[in-house]
Structure formats: structure tokens, C-alpha cells
Image (tube, rainbow, N blue to C red):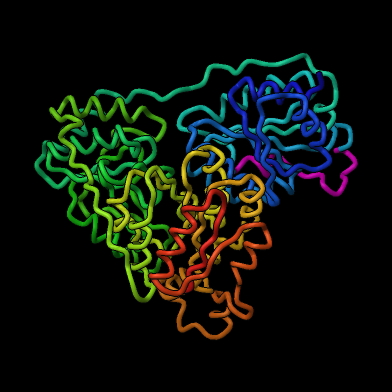
Amino acid sequence: MNGAESLVRTLVKGGVNVCFTNPGTSEMHFVAALDKVDGMRCVLGLFEGVVSGAADGYARMTGTPASTLLHTGPGLGNALANIHNAKKAATPMVNIVGDHATYHVQHDAPLTADIEGIAAPVSHWVKTSPDAKSVATDGAEAIAAASAAPGQIATLILPADTAWNAADGVADVPEIIGRAKVSDSAVEMAASALRSGEPTLLLMTGQALYEDPLNLAGGIAAKMGAHIMSQGSNARLQRGAGRVSVLRIPYVVEQALDVLKNYKHIILVGAKIPVAFFAYPNTPSLLAPEGCEFHTLADLSDDMVDALERLADVVGAKRSDAVRQEADRPGRPTGALDYDTIAAALGAALPEDAIVADESVTTGRGFYPLTAGAPPHCWLNNMGGSIGLGMPLATGAAVACPDRKVLCLEGDGSGMYTLQALWTQAREGLDVTTVIFANRSYAILKGELAKVGAGNPGRKALDMMDLSRPDLDWLMLARGMGVEGSRVSSADELNKALDAGLATQGPYLIEVML
């Protein structure tokens, strides 16, 4: 076999059996190898940002990496924004990036680029295979690097001649670095804070937001009179009726400061010390109240379940002590559309075991309370802040979980970055209902302009935040990519459209006019 086939066989043997692709000439031997090897599903994306975002969504739901296939430095460059988001989410991902043949690079052809230099800022592990006989071993190392706790980005660069020359065979994946146990002193420090009698918060993210560790944290909080919150954005939160309910730290600095102002102790479980998303004049970067003490129970790569179990044992708490969310759907709203009626419509319609890919930005800040009592579901956020993740994230989640309904909540400005994801959803028959919040603006920037103290905006400034002239027509855009949908301008119409979309076996789009 050649190097490309040895790599594909190594990926499949190592548990990487989905490849999100946008290939070019340098990757043709890898593409040909896909026909020769059973067990690798290939999903085409029409833009590399869709490819990397879909790989993120897939891995968040499976816990195992997918691979991407990208074309040289520019192809990797097009994928970078959503690789950045995946890195912030601690998502395992194996990027395969084709390059010119080793002997051709010296001639500086148009696509010649410093691929390692492009990859390094968004990757934990980067390597260029030197020859075909090294490709399988390098691929196995990439899988191990991506799979290391808590999840990493591995980028393997595959020069064309290393793909077409003869290889030795398939390689085994080296031992994967798992989650570390936290120290006894970290557990005792957290227990001391809980026993202090002062207001204490468990601030959590990552693995701690899955159902079982949430039960543990809920039991600890109930036993000790503490509270639980999550970071503002999280890779995957298991929530809904019967689960421990968790609110998140607000995006708006003043709201976050108000929520946290009374706590004397904040115990970090996978989370970082909370900071503002951006800096603003005369506004603090750190969201901690004055005099608050932070205690790290577990880092993101640590075994948070074990840490919470040990903490529960020390303070005498049980999972059964946790207060769980009651089933409490809001009534179906009527009348005009606003943020509250949209939230109520979503809470009333959300099906059991749904996956919500949330990039609703401004519109969705208040969705949590009115969806908390819906049937059990998962909620995925954009953790890196680079917009254009929502629809690709939903695409990858649907590939990972074909038996679950995926609901994508998307701003119209963010959606335009990667609307090609709709084509992939149509081609693959993916069960995704996309809700576009069409305020025809970068609404978040209007508020940001005022907050940074940039003065009274004039026409030029306002035009940079306006998406009209011409208005985007999301129904036409979706239909052009094979996705049907509907447009709504009232709460009653939204209820009906959600029913239609969630009943559709395949992709469907709802444009919500705001």
C-alpha cells in the first residue's frame, strides 16, 4: 500500500471513522485510498470552515475525534476560525493537511505556504511526515495527541509524495494520556470553603456538566448550602427535566458582576476564573467580587467525576441530595415576537434528547430559563467566540447522532459565514432544524459600540453593523442548497414552523423576522 492508504487504515483502526473533507490536488491519493478502505465515512463540505466546525460538533457528541481533510496552507487557513473554536472547547480533532511533494516545495509554487506556521497557533501537536514509511506512525501519534485529555487539536501535514510512495503498513495508536486524579489537598481546600459558612459557588464546565457529575455537584450544593453555575459558554451541557439545573454567567459585564457579587468562595471545577469577554473603558476584566477567594478543585484535563465524588464523600453529600429540575414547559406564546416569546416557543417545542447548537448571540442570551424544564437535552455553545460555528456544529452533531433531533439557533450575521453547511445537511439527509434570527444586523455590535465609549455613531459606522440594502433572503438561500423552510413574523407562526421543522426527517430552516 502507499502512504495515503496506510494513513486511512491507521485512522480507522484507531477509531477515527469519519472524515469531513474539502480536498484538492495534493490530497488525491488520500481521496483514492478512501475507496479502498472500509469503515471511513466521508462528508464533503463546500468551505473549510464547515469542515472544521462539523468535526467539532461530531467530537463533542461522541467524545472521539473525527478527521478533517484540508488542501494545503490556504485550505487550512480557511478552516482556522472553527479550529480555534474547537481548541477553546477542548475538542479532539485530527487535521490532515495536504502539501506539495517534498521535492516541489523548493520551487515556491502558488500554493506553497508555511503550513506548520499556520497550524501551530491552533494546534497542540503539529508534524510534517518526512516520507511514506513514516505516515502511518505519524497518523497514530496524531490520534493519540488529539485524544489526550481533555481533548486536543492534532495537525498532520501530508506531502503529496509521502501519500503516493510505498509504505510499510498500519500503525497502532500509542498510549493515550488520560485524565489525572486531583490531589487530596485540592479536595480538602474545596471542602474547607464549603464548610466556611460563607457564600460559596461551584463554577463548572467541561466534563463536570454531564449528568452524573452534575448530580454529584448538585448533592454537594444542597448539602452545604452552596450554589452551582457554569461558565458563560460550554462545550456540552446536559440539561432539562430530571437533571440538575445550571444557569450560566451572563455575557454582559454588569450583569455578571451583579450575579457574582456576594460570593466569598468560588470553587473551580474545570472552569477558569471568570473574565469579561472583552475589555471596556472603566470596567474590570476580572468578574470576581472584591475579597472573593478562588479554589481550584480540578482543571479541565483532570478527572472531575472522581474529584466531585471525593469531595462529596468528605462533606457527606450524596447524588440523591441534588435538587433536580421539574418538567415545566412554558405555554405556547402568542402575539408579537420578542426574545421572551421566542424562548417560550423553543421551550414548548424542544423534543426529548434533542441537541441544541446555539450561536444565537444577542437573541439567545435569555433562552436558558424558559428551556430549563423541557425534556432532557444537550446544549452546545461557541466557546471560542469566532462566529460562523453554529450550522457546522449542528451538522457534525447530526452526523454523530443520527437518531437525535438537532436544533440550530443561529444569528443571521453569523450564519452567513458558513451557510454552505446547509448544502452538506441536504446532501447527507441530516436531521437538523435551523432557526435563523433575522434582525438584519450585527446587533451585538451596536451594544458593543456604546460600551467601548466610541461616541455617537454616524452613517458610516452604523452601516458596518447593518445587513440590509439588500436584505438577506434566507428561504431563497436555503432552497438554493436543497433545504426547505418557512418565514415567521409572529409567535403563533413560530410555533407552527417549529412543529413542521421538528417533524421533518431531514434539514429544515425557519427564518424568524425580528
4, 344: nearer the viewer: 344
Q: Is residue 267 visible?
A: yes
Residue 373 position, x and y percent, is 27, 51
In the displayed structure image, the side of residue 288 where residue 506 appears, left or right:
right
Residue at position x 25%, y 23% in the image: 184
In the displayed structure, 165 sits above or below 490; it is above
Residue 15 position, x and y percent, is 58, 24
In the displayed structure image, the side of residue 124 where residue 129 appears, left or right:
right
Count up the numbered dots.
Answer: 0
Magenta segment: does it hold 217? no
Q: Is residue 293 visible?
A: no
| Region of the chain picked out in magenta, as a range | 105-121
16, 370: nearer the viewer: 370
Magenta segment: does it hold 108? yes
Residue at position x 53%, y 17% in the image: 175
Residue at position x 80%, y 31% in the image: 32
In the displayed structure, 213 sits above or below 425; it is above
Q: Extreme left residue here?
A: 197
Residue 300 position, x and y percent, is 40, 35
Location of residue 348 (image quadrant): bottom left
Residue at position x 56%, y 40% in the image: 399
In the displayed structure image, the side of residue 363 where residue 202 appears, left or right:
left
Q: Quadrant of the C terminus?
A: bottom left
Residue 165 position, x and y percent, is 85, 23
